[in-house]
Amino acid sequence: TSTMRRLVIGNWKMNGSLAENGRLLSALLDQSGRAQDAELAVCVPYPYLAQAAQALDGHKAAIAWGAQDVSVHARGAFTGEVSADMLHDFGVRWVLAGHSERRAYHGESDELVALKAEVALAAGLAPVVCVGETLQQHQDGLAHEVIARQLGPVLALGAERLARLVVAYEPVWAIGTGQTATPEQAQEVHAFIRATLAAAGAAQVRLLYGGSVKPDNAAGLFAMEDIDGALVGGASLDADEFIAIAAA
Ligand code: PEP
């Protein structure tokens, strides 16, 4: 088991509505006491940041809120983008950087992802840098190589900034597939990421596992030494499941 405070972040992706979110947020608040030892957060679609802020304000210690992406630009002619300062305006604490869906569908490069982490940090937000290999890369035994490449520009941020971010290992073959990495598989990669960060002077960075985390597999994952929490997609849309994961 990790000695760090467990961090469990929900990634709602492009789901929800004012009505659904209202129910989910109040159910999460009602149940958050069951997961008191964990730090909790939900990353919501941009239009619902105000709703999350209003619902969770005053309960930030129980459940913080975040965004799923951020622009690398500060302001100006960047139609459709949202800046780190704008997120900060809405009380955002966490922001995902380089989720595999952004890398795959929006061509986000390792350099861009590191830049997103950098601008987020500069605005006082905490980035969750997502890394992970595809199924093909997994089968070809390239996981470490791929992750080392993804982390490269992030490591260049330096120890002081690395200490203020979180890394999420999300094997692409496990995201939304119901095929979770085994605790041993995840631990093996987490140990590699830990060693890579340690070599950059940042051994204390919290490492989250993501990829079909559910209440029935969470405890096994959290029993591993280098798994400090989880990034949860599908199961974060159900308050019972999300809190059960955090409490596992
Ligand atoms: C994710 O996309 O961050 C994720 C972990 O999704 P899921 O839990 O649905 O696999």
Image (spheres, rainbow, N blue to C red):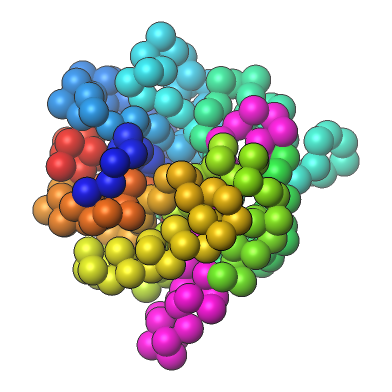
Magenta span has 234? no
- The residue nearer to you, when weighing 22 against 90, is 90
Q: Is residue 48 left or right of residue 17?
A: right
Q: Quadrant of residue 3?
A: top left
Q: Is residue 2 left or right of residue 71?
A: left
Magenta residues, start to end: 120-147
* Residue found at x 27% / y 54%: 225
* Residue found at x 15% / y 42%: 248
Question: Vertical placement of 203 versus 134: above or below?
Answer: above
- The residue nearer to you, when weighing 81 against 87, is 87
- Residue 160 in view in this figure: yes
Ligand 1 shown in quarter = bottom left
**Residue at the outermost bottom position:** 140
Magenta span has 144? yes
- Residue 236 in view in this figure: no
Count of all numbered marks drawn on residues in the image: 0
**Residue at the outermost left position:** 216
Q: Position of residue 188 (x, y in %)?
A: 33, 69
Question: Vertical placement of 23 versus 227: above or below?
Answer: above
